[in-house]
Image (cartoon, rainbow, N blue to C red):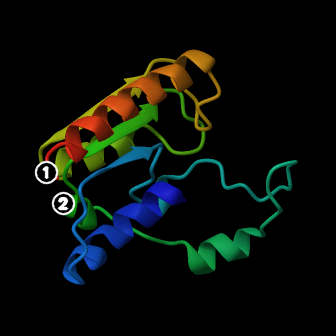
């Protein structure tokens, strides 16, 4: 939920005087109800969480908060089985320029393709170089 956390915190941080220069979001959900695959089973990389945890603690709609975003590069896979790509379109439509959205063809939620990872690394480096040059 890193992307959702960033969206949620953005406006609050700016209100406290933090100068946010920009960021990169990957496969971020804007509405919790759109999440297709809630990770309730334990894996090698994460503990199991009961469905009740998600329904009690993680119901959100960040559509309005997305309007505060600016200088953001957004990545999302078009075959994401956890967070539908429609979330990326919603975020992109609402955030302020400058902005960029890269929809990775055949991309999944964890960005497991080495080609997609290389694209992410190259575009993120270029994005951060561009936005930090203005600071």
Q: Residue at x 20, y 81 (%)?
A: 15
On the image, the x and y values in percent for residue 120 come to 46, 29
Q: As displayed, is residue 119 above or below residue 45?
A: above
Q: Residue at x 47, y 29 (%)?
A: 121
On the image, the x and y values in percent for residue 22 come to 27, 52
On the image, the x and y values in percent for residue 79 come to 53, 27
**Residue 84: assigned label:** none
Front one among 91 and 56:
91
On the image, the x and y values in percent for residue 130 come to 22, 36
Q: How many marks?
A: 2
| Residue occupied by mark 1 | 96
| Residue occupied by mark 2 | 67
Front one among 92 and 23:
23
CA gap between label 1 and label 2 equals 6 Å
Q: Is residue 30 left or right of residue 10?
A: right
Front one among 39 and 13:
13
Q: Residue at x 25, y 74 (%)?
A: 18
Q: Quadrant of the N terminus?
A: bottom right
Q: As displayed, is residue 108 above or below residue 74?
A: above
Q: Quadrant of residue 5?
A: bottom left
Q: As displayed, is residue 54 above or below residue 39?
A: below
Local packing at callout 2 (Cα closer than 10 Å; few below 14, some 14-19, many 20+) is some
Identity of the residue furthest to the bottom in this view: 16
Q: Is residue 40 left or right of residue 93?
A: right
Q: Secondary structure at mark 1?
A: loop
Q: Secondary structure at mark 2?
A: helix
Q: Residue at x 20, y 80 (%)?
A: 17
Q: Is residue 30 left or right of residue 22?
A: right
Among the two numbered marks 1 and 2 on one chain, the one whose residue lies closer to the N terminus: 2
Q: Do labels 1 and 2 touch, CB within 8 Å? A: yes
């Amino acid at each position: 939920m890193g992307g959702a956390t960033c969206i949620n915190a953005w406006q609050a941080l700016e209100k406290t005087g933090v100068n946010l220069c920009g960021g990169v979001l990957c496969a971020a959900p804007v509405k919790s109800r759109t999440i297709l695959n809630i990770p309730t089973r334990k894996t090698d990389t994460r503990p199991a969480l009961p469905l009740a945890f998600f329904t009690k603690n993680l119901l959100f709609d960040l559509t309005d908060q997305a309007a505060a975003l600016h200088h953001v590069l957004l990545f999302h896979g078009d075959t994401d089985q956890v967070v539908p790509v429609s979330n990326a379109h919603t975020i992109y439509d609402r955030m302020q320029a400058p902005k960029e959205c890269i929809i990775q063809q055949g991309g999944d939620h964890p960005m497991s393709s080495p080609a997609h990872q290389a694209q992410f690394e190259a575009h993120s480096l270029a994005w951060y170089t561009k936005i930090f040059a203005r600071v």
